[in-house]
Amino acid sequence: MNIFISLFSSIEDPNNPNVAIPCFYETIIEDFKKSGHNLFVFVSKNFGANYENIPQELLDEIKAFKPDLFILFNNTFYDISKYFDVPIVVYEVDTPLFYSNRESLKKNISRYKFIISQEESVKTLEDMFNVNSKNILKIPFFTEVHAENLPIEQNISFIGTKFVNSQHQNIYNKFMMQNPDNEEIIQFKSIINEFLNNPLITKQEILAKVNTKSSKIIDNLDLNYLIFLLSDYNRVETLDAVADLGLRIYGTKNWITDTYNKPNLILNFINTPVYSLKHNQDIYNSSKIGININHLQACSGFSWRVCDILASNACLVSEYKSNIESFFVKANIPMFTNHYEAREICKKLINNENMRKDIVAASQEIIDSKFRYKYTKREIENFLNLDFSNINNTPSIKYKIQYAQDVVHNKNKTLQQIFSIKNSDDKKHKIISLFGAKIKVKR
């Protein structure tokens, strides 16, 4: 088969410029390669970008590749549904609220099949995108990390992103700078609490719940940004609570370039690229504890980090997620609901080797029995009615990276076409479609 894969990765590694992609994607790509299938891998550096018309040169490249299957993680690609009559799979790594090209998906939704990892996403796809349930496959994440006996180098390890660049004013700053009265501040706090309890709520629903008509609130309430702010706060505060217990942080460089005042976190960052299967496997196997703090959009579900830790010699400590509780009930995974609990659990496990090893042994057994890629692949094959079995073929693999400036260049070309439109309303709608944002015009 010729398989086209599209994904987002912000990872930069000068020693590995073409294939510096997270281990979850690496597992899928390597399995297809080992099975003899040909791959065209498109790596975008633009999270959540809305893509307009596909450039003709890129379309010609894909046509020459003759794809039999498209796998688009988070729908990170142009709308190619009208150009190819082959299966198109949108594979969830974030909630559907973060898919690219949501509007174009809705226009031709029957052309797509969806693979998701949490129950809330089923409802979102059915309600927001009108997806038929027969076109949705719900499967948990998997891992190909394996346990190895390595020297312990850190008590606690965390591999992940700092979600927000804190060098700029956020919506709290902007709201308070408008001198809101006490009632407006109370309403804003209520909105945050409502959002923490239901991160998938819409702006209209949340405004109705708190019964506000304040323009100071409405104008500053960007839920897409708020979910990142709150996720960032939760991750930073939780890690800071365990920082003095022997924590090492690996991930994006804004852990040390941002202006937040958390010296323990900044000084505990290990400034080396970490993304591959081997990177993750080595770090977790040399840690007593691997800690998990999810993005807020993971309501009942969890990130692929969870399975990676559970498969290693590290003991998973996670914020509470109902799917972790139900999937790994026999392992009795220690979970916390606040920063203080996280600290107490980590302290207890660091000092209790027998308890830690019992949890690790039970976790590894469950991973090996249910959460390896071979089980996931079998379900995907049945869902798509395809066979990914090994074939006698020397596979080819092609990588294509799209940087931010590439998207800007394409948008500038499109803008030149838009500004030639005479009708002002048509022109405005085209600009909104291009940038995926509401535009306010001061008259």
Image (cartoon, grey):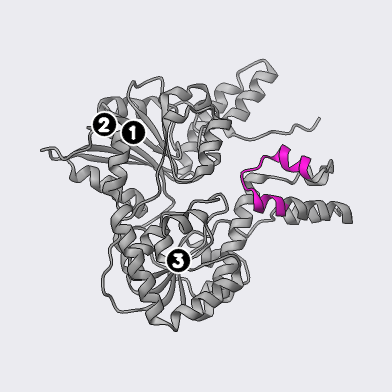
Tell me: 85 left or right of 231. left
Query: Which three-letter amino acid code belongs to the residue tagged 1?
Result: Phe
The quadrant holding residue 272 is bottom left
> Which residues fall within the magenta stretch?
192-209
Query: Which three-letter amino acid code belongs to the residue tagged 3?
Result: Ile
Callout 2 touching callout 3 (CB < 8 Å): no
Do we see residue 48 in this rendering? no
The quadrant holding residue 229 is bottom right
Q: Which residue is mark 2?
A: 386
What residue do we see at 34% from left, 38% from top?
5
Q: Is residue 224 magenta?
A: no
Q: Tell me residue 164's x, y (percent).
A: 58, 56
Q: CA distance from mark 3 to mark 1?
A: 31 Å
Nearest the viewer among 40 and 236 is 236
What residue do we see at 64% from left, 48% from top?
198
Q: Which residue is mark 3?
A: 333
In this view, which residue lies farthest toward the left?
392
In this view, which residue lies farthest toward the front?
330
Tell me: 136 left or right of 295. left
